[in-house]
Amino acid sequence: MRELLFQLEQDMGLDDMSQNEKDILYAFHMIAESKEEADVHSEALRSHNTVRAMKHATYHRTLKRLLDQGFIQHAPQRKTGLYRLGATH
């Protein structure tokens, strides 16, 4: 199973990500799937089990890296607080 997950991460370009980046991205996916909505609010993301223990500054730096890399993007008409998966990922 672990090998399958590693292969999936490689195929998706996630193998070079830090664990914090993966944790936020996994949380993002789980929240979006459970709500069946494309947009995820930062408060829901911040309080998710995989992200909750992350230090405040680390969370924001990691979120910024994911935005810069195009894995997530701001929701239309919003500059902060609401995000969706990036078009390239």
Image (tube, rainbow, N blue to C red):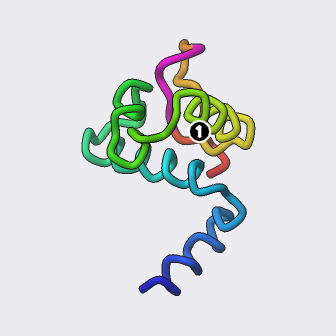
* Three-letter residue code for mark 1: Ile
- Please give the residue where the numbered disc 1 appears in the rendered image: 72
- Answer with the quarter of the image where residue 74 lies: top right
Q: Position of residue 80 (x, y in %)?
A: 55, 16
Q: Count of labels shown?
A: 1
Residue extent of the magenta highlight: 79-84
Q: Position of residue 64 (x, y in %)?
A: 67, 31
Q: In this view, does 17 lie to the left or right of 82?
A: right
Q: Where is residue 54 in the image (x, y as percent from the top left)?
A: 48, 40
Mark 1 falls on what kind of element?
A: strand
Q: Nearer the viewer, residue 9 or 36?
A: 9
Q: In this view, does 37 lie to the left or right of 39?
A: left
Q: In this view, does 34 lie to the left or right of 72?
A: left
Q: Which residue lies furthest to the left in this view?
A: 34
Quadrant location of the N terminus in the rendered image: bottom left
Q: Where is residue 59 in the image (x, y as percent from the top left)?
A: 55, 34
Can you say whether 10 is above or below 71 in the image? Answer: below
Q: Residue at x 52, y 24 (%)?
A: 75
Q: Residue at x 59, y 49 (%)?
A: 21
Q: Does the magenta stretch include residue 15?
A: no
Q: Which residue is drawn at 62% across and 65% down?
A: 12
Q: Residue at x 42, y 41 (%)?
A: 53
Residue count near mark 1 (Cα–Cα under 10 Å), binned few <14, some 14–19, many ≥20: many
Can you say whether 89 is above or below 31 in the image? Answer: below
